[in-house]
Amino acid sequence: MSEAFRRLVRMKIVVTTPTGNVGSLLAPTLVRAGVRPTLLARDATRVAPEVREVCDVVEADQGDRDAVVAATRDADALYWVDPPTDDDDPLDGYRRMSETVAHAVTTNRVPRVVFQSSVGAEGRHGFGEIDGLGLTEELLNATGADVTHLRNGYFFSNLLMDLDGIRAGVLTTTHPVDRPLAWVAPLDIATVAATRLLSTDWHGVQTLGVHGPADLSFAQVADILGDVLGRPVSAQQVSEQDQAQALAGFGMTPAQVEAVLGMTRGFADGFEPEDPRTIATTTPTTLGAWAYEHLRPALAS
Ligand SMILES: NC(=O)c1ccc[n+]([C@@H]2O[C@H](COP(=O)([O-])OP(=O)(O)OC[C@H]3O[C@@H](n4cnc5c(N)ncnc54)[C@H](OP(=O)(O)O)[C@@H]3O)[C@@H](O)[C@H]2O)c1
């Protein structure tokens, strides 16, 4: 291994969900900065071999308090993501994860935490699943650590969960199709996270919007996808009732359905993110560039 990929930065940075949309991009970003990150994964074999070679991998379930305490011992910084759980009520899972991270940060006196939160978490209630991220924010705020909550926009990668719809030329949502939202590339979030984790020159509790290059309505998103794919895509608003029926058809419990629908409801008329769009919250990757690189091949496979 070349000298460039040895640990050059003497910092223990623990990264959770290293196989997730953001975590999988954050680990290599830190490696490029000279860090040998510690990856907390529930199954080490799911981390790519070339990533495992330049990182320390600790196997732990994020719901296991003792394992998370052990994995974060002596950490200089922690990137925490609340992973999805299969609880009947997703908010129960978020509560468990919130309590786990707060316990580990307090026990180990982890000095610096960057948390993968969301636009809307500032509401604390009324945003469906995002309320769970609001709870994690609150419990982390009480630990005394320096904490930055990344208030991320809607991930471009969510589109990968609707490949059939996009193939059929229709993007469906309960969100009004002409109402703009912040949409962001996972790589932009990873980049912002890395800079916060590496910098020791910020303190206290902070929030930072990660909003992508522009707010986009679903109608605009559909037009951009149509341009990239070379065929028409349209956006169509569906009623909560129809969406609830469709989600229940996938076997989701009523609380899981509510956690999804509640997110859109939270962004209803009049919502303004606490972190406004500024040069600090605007990130570069466009939806068109992301779709060309990630969505086109996913649709082809
Ligand atoms: N999607 C959005 O628009 C959006 C916006 C803002 C915030 N968020 C938040 O971002 C988070 C999701 O992040 P993501 O999209 O980057 O991740 P993701 O792609 O959904 O990946 C989930 C990750 O969690 C891991 N995982 C699942 N259960 C685990 C457990 N019990 N213990 C340890 N690891 C576990 C998975 O590992 P395996 O490889 O083992 O499965 C995988 O790495 C959620 O908290 C969500 O609320 C999402």
Image (spheres, rainbow, N blue to C red):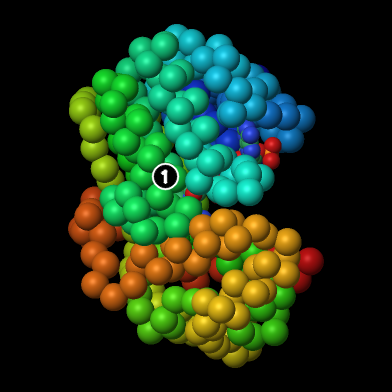
Label 1, ligand 1: CB separation under 8 Å: yes
Q: Percent x, y for residue 39?
A: 58, 26
Is any part of residue 56 visible from this angle? no
Q: In which quarter of the image is the N terminus?
A: top right
Location of residue 117 with respect to 14 vertically, above or below: below
Asked whether, in this view, residue 108 is left or right of residue 156, the answer is left
Which image quarter holds the C terminus?
bottom right
Which residue appears at 34% of the width and 53% of the height?
125
Around disc 1, counting alpha carbons within 10 Å, would you say few (fewer than 14), some (14 to 19), or many (20 or more)? many
Viewer can see residue 33: yes
Helix, strand, or loop for circle 1? helix
Count numbered badges in the picture. Answer: 1
Image quadrant where residue 165 sits: bottom right
Q: Disc 1 marks which amino acid?
A: Leu
In percent of width and height, residue 115 lies at 40, 37
Residue 149: x, y in percent? Answer: 33, 40
Q: Which of 6 and 206 is in front in this view?
A: 206
Disc 1 designates what residue? 133
Can you tell which quarter of the image residue 230 is in? bottom right
Residue at horizontal 64 percent and vertical 64 percent from the top: 161
Q: Which of 295 and 66 is in front in this view?
A: 66
| Left/right of residue 161 with respect to residue 90 in the rendered view | right
Residue pictured at 44% horizontal, 45% vertical: 132
Q: In which quarter of the image is ligand 1?
A: top right
